[in-house]
Amino acid sequence: MINKIHNWTDKKLEENKIGWINNFSDLKTVLDYKKSFFSEEKDLQILSINFPETEKNQALNILSPTNQKSGEIGIYQNLKKEIKENTLEELLGFDLIGIEPGGDFHSFHCHDLKDDLISKFEIKINKNGLIQENKNWKEMVDYMNNSDNGFEPVPWFFVKVNRVKTAST
């Protein structure tokens, strides 16, 4: 099974249908992956992250290969494509993500910041473990990107997290 996944992902990387690392370029490719390797799994969910329009250009600049000293990472490739949210997406909440130079990313939960963010920015965490509302997001991003606060020295962004609804969900 692992060899089949390796072969599939190698092919899809060459076709620019997946991006390094952990990114699918379109819903059709995600559904093909799910059907090919996890068709028996009923609890899988497809999630999307969406940058605020005001932050997209800044993210493109920061994640540019010339600034990262690497190739184009998947998030950068998808931002360049200007993939829009669609009506099949259900809002789950908002997250603060730090993006590593290689394209991997992590949540504010990696720093166990929930209680600090709640008290400092008066936010609510919803049943999905995500930030309920998008108020104060600019201040939270500034806080995460301030090196004096001791977080990962990577660019941090505020993103909307959606569940993609498909015929099987």
Image (tube, rainbow, N blue to C red):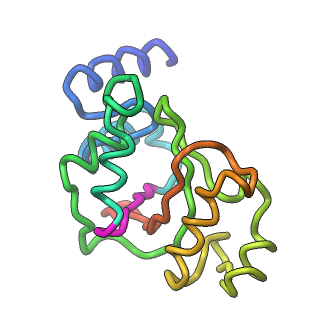
Q: Residue furthest front?
A: 148
Percent from the top left, x then y, of residue 114?
A: 75, 69
Using the image as rendered, state which of residue 57 and residue 41 is in the foreground: 57
Percent from the top left, x then y, of residue 106?
A: 60, 48
Q: Is residue 156 above or below residue 131?
A: above
- Residue pictured at 61% horizontal, 71% vertical: 130
Task: State the image quarter where residue 32 is shown.
Answer: top left
Q: How many marks?
A: 0
* Residue 51 located within the stretch drawn in magenta: yes
In the image, is 66 to the left or to the right of 83?
right
- Residue pictured at 34% horizontal, 55% vertical: 58
Using the image as rendered, state which of residue 169 and residue 67 is in the foreground: 67
Percent from the top left, x then y, of residue 156?
A: 54, 54
* Residue 109 located within the stretch drawn in magenta: no
- Residue pictured at 47% horizontal, 38% vertical: 38
Q: Which residues are magenta?
A: 46-54
Percent from the top left, x then y, of residue 129?
A: 67, 70
Q: Is residue 128 above or below residue 67?
A: below
Q: Is residue 118 above or below residue 44?
A: below
Q: Is residue 164 above or below residue 27?
A: below
In the image, is 89 to the left or to the right of 45?
left
Task: State the image quarter where residue 141 is shown.
Answer: bottom right
- Residue pictured at 63% horizontal, 60% vertical: 144
Quadrant of image for the C terminus: bottom left
